[in-house]
Image: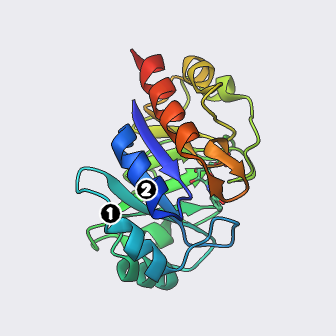
Amino acid sequence: MHVKICGLSEPGHVETAVEAGADAIGFVLTRSPRRVTPERAAELAALVPDHVLTVGVFRGEDPAEVRAATLAAGLRAVQLHGHHPHADFTALKGLGLTLVRAVDAEADLRCGAYDEDLLIVDAPRPGSGEPWDWAAVRGRPSGRWLLAGGLDPANVATAIEAARPWGVDVSSGVEVAPGVKDSGLIRAFVAAARGAAR
Ligand SMILES: O=C(O)c1ccccc1N[C@@H]1O[C@H](COP(=O)(O)O)[C@@H](O)[C@H]1O
């Protein structure tokens, strides 16, 4: 079970996520209570070992802006939310970045349909922490995909059972207030996701 922890902005929380066994760590580079600058993302990404994927999270920015921010931060992946056309992914190909397409359940759920490497199936309002009908996507996505949207340490096992994803992604569910992560919740989330996958 692949586990991504998203929206980190403090060094201690990055270190906790790595120690807890996260496979990927996301830095939000778009409008959000979790937004960090590319410079801050670079400082945080420097704490992440190579086996953990560092991801820049965007929503609606054009490829030139995504490219500039991601390369300035030294991140290894880009995650595009919203209605990005196929051409936006094509424009980001060839940079050595892992491409992640994040959509809601109404979108094309074939991983690779837009030349992306990984798909995230999320709630209609990304980063809102709102749970949704995870079971509705069971069996529909193809390829590598993460379930996101309203997950937390208490419900992630149920969500995995309902949707059977390749991995899970969380932001709000490991916070005590919007944008304020909690180390105990990060550890509990990774443990619960791993436990559910056994
Ligand atoms: O986290 C944000 O603030 C955010 C802002 C804009 C686009 C995506 C964002 N986060 C992504 O939303 C889901 C998880 O949301 P949550 O756990 O329900 O809060 C995940 O894909 C994050 O990367």
Task: Name the foreground residue: 193 vs 176.
Answer: 176
Residue 180 numbered tag: none
- Which quadrant is home to the C terminus? top left
Q: Residues within 10 Å of mark 2 (few under 14, many from 20)?
A: many
Left or right: 105 with respect to 67? Answer: right
Q: Residue at x 39, y 74 (%)?
A: 43
The answer to whether the residues at label 2 and label 1 have Cβ atoms under 8 Å apart is: yes
Q: Is residue 158 above or below residue 75?
A: above
Left or right: 91 with respect to 161? Answer: left
Q: Residue at x 54, y 65 (%)?
A: 9
Query: Ligand 1 closer than 8 Å to the CB at disc 2?
Result: no
- Disc 1 residue type? Leu
Estimate the x, y position of residue 12 in percent, counting from the top left.
Answer: 45, 57
Estimate the x, y position of residue 88 in percent, counting from the top left.
Answer: 49, 72
Q: Is residue 109 visible?
A: no
Q: Is residue 140 above or below residue 70?
A: above
